[in-house]
Image (cartoon, helix red, strand yellow):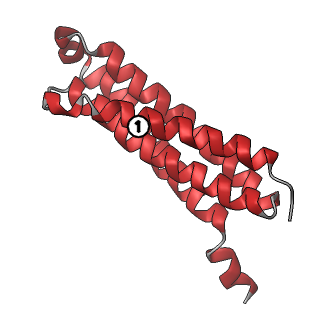
Amino acid sequence: MCNRARMTSPHRFLLIAAGLLGATGIALGAFGAHGLQASLAERGMTHAWESAARYQMLHVVALLAAAAWVRVARGAAVNRVVWAGRLWCAGILLFSGSLYWLATGGPRWLGPITPLGGVAFMAGWVLVAGAAWAKDE
């Protein structure tokens, strides 16, 4: 029973997301710096690609911190931190994902999606503040 509880613990999602998004962030950053360098420079999209990779990796580190926090948190803080992690994952997909796609010549209609990812990032950080503010139950 103890082992089953560990398999469904809230920090597991955060660690899996951090691992997968961290690996793809490193791969995409390297691919942009080496495999797509000339193409991105020609389009004037090097900065967009670098921003996408930077925000992705910054939030991967935040996911790791959230996983550690959830392991020791109690009460309302746990739920808020887990939701912050979910929003950061959505932010990575929307913000970084749309920038990666735009940088490689994706359709321009993706442009308005990027700020939605930024809003998801900010909402996650607001939840972190709320989790710190919450009283342990």
Return the residue at label 1.
117
Q: Is residue 42 visible?
A: yes
Count every numbered label the image shows and give the total. 1
Classify the position of the C terminus by image quarter: bottom right
Quarter-of-image position of residue 135: bottom right
**Percent x, y for residue 41?**
23, 10
* Residue 23 in the figure: left or right of residue 69: left
Residue that lies at the very extreme toward the right in this rendered image: 136
Q: Residue at x 60, y 46 (%)?
A: 63
Q: Residue at x 80, y 58 (%)?
A: 73
Q: Nearer the viewer, residue 84 or 25?
A: 84
Quarter-of-image position of residue 96: top left
Q: Nearer the viewer, residue 116 or 104?
A: 116
**Tag 1, which secondary structure?**
helix
Above or below — where is 58 with respect to 47? below
Q: Residue at x 80, y 45 (%)?
A: 133
Q: Residues within 10 Å of mark 1 (few under 14, many from 20)?
A: many
* Residue 93 in the figure: left or right of residue 67: left
**Percent x, y for residue 123?**
55, 41
**Percent x, y for residue 27?**
38, 36
Above or below — where is 74 with respect to 87? below
* Residue 134 in the figure: left or right of residue 116: right
Q: Is residue 26 visible?
A: no
Q: Residue at x 69, y 80 (%)?
A: 5
Quarter-of-image position of residue 52: top left
- Looking at the picture, which amino acid does disc 1 mark? Gly
Classify the position of the N terminus by image quarter: bottom right
**Percent x, y for residue 26?**
44, 35
